[in-house]
Amino acid sequence: MTLSRTERARAGGPVATTEVKAPPQGPRPSRRHRWDARWSPYAFITPFFVFFAAFGLFPLIYTGWASLHRVSLHNPTEMEWSGLHNYTRLLEDEFFWNALGNTFTIGVLSTVPQLLMALGLAHLLHARLRGSAFFRVALLTPYATSVAAATLVFAMLYGRDYGMVNWALELVGVGPVDWEGGSWSSQFAVSSIVIWRWTGYNALIYLAAMQAIPDDLYESAALDGASAWQRFVHVTVPSLRPTILFTVVVSTIGATQLFGEPLLFGGSQTGGGSHQYQTLGLYLYEQGWFSFHLGRAAAVAWAMFLILIVVGLVYWLIARRLSKSH
């Protein structure tokens, strides 16, 4: 008769036990190793936040603080509290509204044709064009050119007396145009510089997005009898909506901050004799470094910042609605 383990334990007899051995453990990591594993990721990202705080956040906050004071360029350390006076003065300044209108006009004249041309060029390069690698490099050439060099060349092309553009217009019977003196002509000239510099950059962004579109979508559309134009309108463009919205936002930010092209085109901070192409960037430059009112210039800078925030919120709402409809 065989007793169970429980009965043997009650009878006082020996009970066979099975020992469970713990797996061998290695040496315990040192405190230095534990600290390294815990804090190293924070140390790697710390330089970014340090430089951002020093060259991004601090100037932004200090500019906002200076916009609430009367500050002169002759003595920038002395500040006299003025509250919102610099902002209320902007609302009453006709030159500020003129600069805002010029910025909007130049932004539209440069952004819309630029993105449409970029979309077309990207579509051509996506169609396996011969020598596409050469054309991709050529598209980046204007972007790699400095603002000063490009603007000075365009200023010579748009010269009233000896410019090549007026020479070409005279060949077709159109009289010489004072590109810098006119309102629309000067804004068109400045916009053409922006278009020339940034079209290729945006075209390569669109090209990269087009290459990510699955070929199955094009094949399905072709089997349904869609033409090349229909495939472009109903397959390519809807797939590029996030990218198009991104380029619109970036182009809007660039147009709002436009400074180098109008400054070098006429060589004056006033944007022409009648301020006909003075942008917000030039108006800020004029207030701070020629009228010596740093407080007003800081108010202009913060006004530009607030405008960009509003524009960003509008684009965010549009993107949210498009994503819901999609």
Image: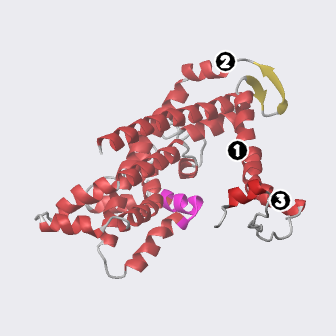
Q: Residue 66 occupies which quadrant of the picture?
A: top right
Q: Which residues are magenta?
A: 144-155
The kind of residue tagged 2 is His
Q: Is 98 colored magenta in this rendering?
A: no
Q: Residues within 10 Å of mark 3 (few under 14, many from 20)?
A: few
Rounded to the nearest angstrom, the CA distance separating label 2 from label 1 is 25 Å
Residue in view at x 85 percent, y 31 percent: 77
Q: Nearer the viewer, mark 2 or mark 1?
A: 1
Of the residues under marks 2 and 3, which one precedes in the sequence? 3
| Magenta part, dominant SS | helix
Q: Name the foreground residue: 247 vs 259.
A: 247
Rounded to the nearest angstrom, the CA distance separating label 2 from label 3 is 55 Å
Q: Name the foreground residue: 265 vs 207.
A: 207
* Rendered location of residue 256, percent (x, y): 52, 41
Q: Which residue is mark 3?
A: 34
Look at the picture and state if 271 lies above or below 115.
Answer: above
Residue, far left: 225
**Where's the C terminus, which quadrant?**
top left
Look at the picture and state if 45 lies above or below 141.
Answer: above
Q: Is 150 colored magenta in this rendering?
A: yes
Q: Which residue is mark 2?
A: 85
The kind of residue tagged 1 is Gly
Of the residues under marks 3 and 1, which one precedes in the sequence? 3
Q: Which residue is mark 1?
A: 56
* Rendered location of residue 218, percent (x, y): 23, 66
